[in-house]
Image (tube, grey):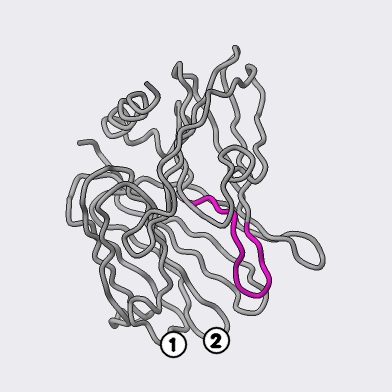
Amino acid sequence: MLRRFFLAASLILAAAPSWAQFVAPGGTIPVVANLSGKNGTFWRSDVQILNLGDSSTSVVMQLYPEIVNGVPAFQPMVSDPITIAGGSQLVLSNILQSKFGLIDVKGALMIYSTDGTPLVLASRTYTNGSAGSYGQDVSSILVDGSAWVAGVENDSAYRTNLGIFWPWDESVQFIVNIYNTDGQPAGSGQITFSQAGLQQKGLDAFNVGVLPAGYIVITCNKPGELWYAYGTTVDQASGDAVYRPARGYQITGQ
């Protein structure tokens, strides 16, 4: 029943792509995590869901797995409905562990109200340091065709990861090209999906050497399909990170 609901919601989203950018009955968080990182970091994601309606609503969440070397880290999961009172906000700390019982993984999350009530989503993925926590806001911008991530760096000071969330259970290929600030090629490669899920790769996977500054171009081989991508640039010394959603041209409809 819930899986059919998510399919219907996805079809509605494709027909009205502006929902991904503004207030809507649902939305996407392209990456959520509960796992250790470099330099002693441990990343976890908190999610907030704000009910803009005057009455209570129920929300459901579908979690998609990270896919590593063609293998999903877990099977897609659907939460039980969660009630949120009208005009109130639900806070879900360390959502992968608290709501899905998962540790040492990451994935992508879709959230919808079951009755069409508009929601506002927020998410922070962070780690605790010696003087408090630090992390990154994670937001979503729906794209199709080609999308760009500016302001990436890959050297001794910073490293950059590229993530793509493909929300459809069908095969697709993304062509990735990385350029330096002068527009000269710095690396390239492909990311292929055979099912819905998240893939995240460092720029080293695209044969990028030292890149003090540059940008990424991602192109889907299925024009008109909708997807999400991002770059996250990480301080090599502290582990602090900056999240940048990939941006495309305005979507005018299917």
Is 68 displayed left or right of 96 in the figure? Answer: left
- Give how far across and how far down residue 85 sits, in percent: 64, 18
Above-or-below relation of 124 to 62:
below
Is 212 displayed left or right of 99 in the figure? Answer: left
Q: Is residue 186 magenta?
A: no
Q: Which quadrant of the figure contains the N terminus? A: top left
Tally of numbered tags = 2
- Identified by mark 1, the residue type is Val
Judging by the rendered image, the residue that carries numbered circle 2 is: 156
Is 75 displayed left or right of 91 in the figure? Answer: left
Q: Is residue 34 magenta?
A: yes
Above-or-below relation of 181 to 57:
below
- Give how far across and how far down residue 108 sits, in percent: 45, 47
- Identified by mark 2, the residue type is Ser
Q: Earlier in the sequence, mark 1 or mark 2?
A: 2
Is 242 displayed left or right of 196 in the figure? Answer: right
Q: Residue furthest right?
A: 131
Judging by the rendered image, the residue that carries numbered circle 1 is: 210
SS assignment for the magenta stretch, majority? strand
Question: Where are the magenta residues, as a range?
Answer: 31-43
Q: Which quadrant of the figure contains the C terminus? A: top left
Q: Secondary structure at mark 1?
A: loop
Q: Please tell me how crowded label 1 is: few (under 14), some (14-19), or many (20+) other residues with Cα within 10 Å.
A: some
Q: Residue at x 63, y 71 (%)?
A: 239
When asked about the image quadrant of residue 208, the answer is bottom left
Above-or-below relation of 90 to 55:
below
Q: Which mark is residue 60?
A: none
Q: Please tell me how crowded label 2 is: few (under 14), some (14-19), or many (20+) other residues with Cα within 10 Å.
A: few
- Give how far across and how far down residue 232 sits, in percent: 50, 64
Q: Residue at x 33, y 76 (%)?
A: 206
Q: Are marks 1 and 2 in contact (CB under 8 Å)?
A: yes
